[in-house]
Amino acid sequence: MDDVVILGIETSCDETAAAVVRNGSELLSNVINSQINVHRKFGGVVPEVASRKHIENISGVVEQALADAALDFGEIDVVAVTNRPGLIGALLVGVSFAKGLAYALDRPLIAVNHLEGHIYANFLENPDIEFPVVCLVVSGGHTSLVYMESHGCCEVMGETRDDAAGEAFDKVARFLGLGYPGGPAVERAARDGQPGIYQLPRVYLDRNDFEFSFSGLKTATMNQWNQLKRKQGFANVNDLAAEFQAALVEVLVEKTVLAGLTREVNSILLAGGVAANGLLREQLASRSREEGLRLYRPSMDLCTDNAAMIAGCAYHQYLRGETAPLNLNAYAGLDLL
Ligand code: KG4
Ligand code: ZN
């Protein structure tokens, strides 16, 4: 088959991103314009501001992705875009831009599910991963265990009943005054603290299923902080951050390993923004090794939102003939894989 060069576009949250990927795994460029500094002063992503920034940035980001790949628009074979789930106004910027481009270039358009995109960050770097696999998808908006029998065949085994793992990191960081985005801030604080000095619950760990709940852990963290301050007038933020991170990571790791063993897969995959967490990466690696499971993790810059993973995922959809019509819409909450 001839080479397939795909331009991927991603605007589901606060990163305006474009990337060019050849044949699903050859990364020709990967441009990410992060709005973190814009949203930091609000302590979280402001949807209306995100949409406006995407509009300002998208042309330049796409042009940069082509320039970095040393390609002209005419050399793009397929245009791929995230159309679900995410902030609706943010998604619409990418979807509208991609539709215009696909129409102008007379190229096929492919609609990609953001969560499936995260999973495909693994296939960018390791195209020959053997199926079936179990994947833990942990981001700011989602926490799911997904069983994949083959490319595109995703079954959700379990997910969070309330807060996503990344959301819990962000909310706890905000409460403790550690900064934004919360995941890296908690991780930094935890490095100077010790787990076990304070005690927090491992929620749902005793249940033999694949559901998660992080809202209770978040509330327990906040209550413990308030109580310590009231009773002792002091609490060590680093120790509390370390215990929160340990409690959350232990549940993610044990449930993922159990899911892999239950489905008798050879490999497990880690994906999503929280996959950048050092403790999660280390503990999942060591528990997988103990249980004879092979672990794949994206490199750090492919964990958080990017468009390379979108183009990588789109390649397999393209091979299956799953192109989208030019009246493609965006969907905020379609979190089904
Ligand atoms: O996948 P992502 O970039 O966006 C969504 O699709 O949601 O994930 C962002 C989330 C945020 O909640 C952020 O705090 C979290 O990933 N995150 C981390 C780390 N880096 C990013 N959480 C824990 N440890 C990290 N090092
Ligand atoms: Zn994401």
Image (cartoon, helix red, strand yellow):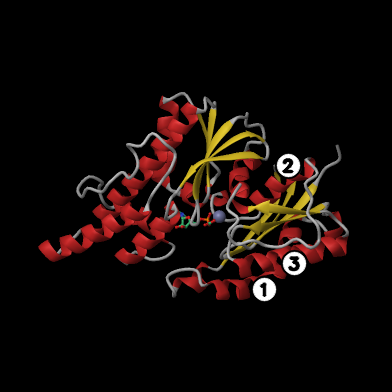
Question: Which residue occupies the extreme left position in the image?
Answer: 231
Q: Who's the residue at 41% across and 42% down the image?
A: 252
Query: In the visual, does 23 lie left or right of 237?
Result: right
Residue type, label 1: Ile
Residue type, label 2: His
User: Looking at the image, is 73 positioned above or below residue 207?
Assistant: below
How many residues crowd mark 3 within 10 Å: few (<14), some (14–19), many (20+)? some
Query: In the visual, does 197 lie left or right of 328?
Result: left
User: Looking at the image, is 327 positioned above or below residue 294?
Assistant: below
Q: Position of residue 27 (x, y in %)?
A: 69, 47
Q: Is residue 63 visible?
A: no
The disc at residue 316 is: 2
Query: In the visual, does 330 lie left or right of 44?
Result: right
Q: Position of residue 210 (x, y in %)?
A: 44, 39
Q: Quadrant of the N terminus?
A: top right
Query: Secondary structure beneath disc 2?
Result: helix
Q: Is residue 257 visible?
A: yes
- Among the two numbered marks 2 and 3 on one chain, the one whose residue lies closer to the N terminus: 3
The residue under label 1 is 55
Q: Who's the residue at 69% across and 64% down the image?
A: 94
Quarter of the rendering containing residue 170: bottom left
Q: Who's the residue at 72% across and 69% down the image?
A: 59
Q: Rounded to the nearest whole Å, what is the CA distance between mark 1 and mark 2? A: 28 Å
State the residue in front, 245 or 67: 245
Q: Who's the residue at 45% across and 36% down the image?
A: 256
Q: Where is residue 157 in the image (x, y as percent from the top left)?
A: 51, 39
The disc at residue 97 is: 3
Query: Secondary structure beneath disc 1?
Result: helix
Query: Secondary structure beneath disc 3?
Result: helix
- Among the two numbered marks 3 and 1 on one chain, the one whose residue lies closer to the N terminus: 1
